[in-house]
Image (cartoon, rainbow, N blue to C red):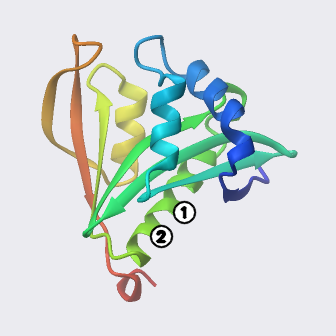
Amino acid sequence: MNFTFRPCQPTDFETLYRIDRACYEPGIAYSRRTLRSFLTLRESHCWVACLAGEIAGFLIAFWEDGLGHVITIDVVESARRLGAGSALLALAEREMSQGGVRRVDIETATNKRPAIAFWNKHGYRAIGVHPRYYQGRIDAYLMSKRLAPPSAAK
């Protein structure tokens, strides 16, 4: 697929909010306030994937002091398994590496096999479990990946 990628713009907010609500069940999807707070953190970065001029997915990450964290990666159902998520992650990892990040962490529900498989495919490994992380009842894996410095990644 011919996705294009760009930094998120403030006018994208409602679309991102709708996509997040479609990707996650109530209680796990972000509230407007929480999503907006992630997007406005000084250390936060968001990229969108577009297909035929429409936003098909997005990724929010933040980093500082050599540690990165992927907050969310959301892709609309019709664009899943077409490479948007992998491309967004590669873009974010490249930017983080150039920003001095050497480790990236994520959380994912222990009962979401497709998500676990996605992260494993991209080199993330479980390093711990957060009990009752989602909705006070669903455990989450803390997964992590080491990033190479930019000169070593070429």
Q: Nearer the viewer, residue 1 or 129?
A: 129
- Residue 139 appears at what percent x and percent y? 20, 21
Residue 46 position within the rendered picture, expressed as x and y whole percent measured from the top left: 55, 52
Judged from this view, the residue extending furthest toward the bottom is 151
Circle 2 crowding by C-alpha within 10 Å: few under 14, some 14–19, many from 20: some
Query: Is 55 or 14 nearer to us in this picture?
Result: 14
The amino acid at mark 1 is: Leu
Taking the spot 66% from the left edge, 24% from the top edge, the residue there is 18
SS class of the residue under badge 1? helix
Q: Are marks 1 and 2 in contact (CB under 8 Å)?
A: yes
**From what the image shows, is residue 102 above or below residue 55?**
below
Compared across the picture, whether 137 is left or right of 84 comes to: left
Residue 118 in picture, x, y percent from top left: 42, 40
Q: CA distance from mark 1 to mark 2?
A: 5 Å
Q: Which residue is mark 1?
A: 91
x, y percentage for residue 117?
Answer: 38, 37
Q: Amino acid at mark 2?
A: Arg
Q: Which mark is residue 94?
A: 2
Q: Is residue 27 above or below residue 43?
A: above
Number of residue marks:
2
Quarter of image, res 4: bottom right
Q: Determine the residue positioned at 64% across, 34% down.
A: 16
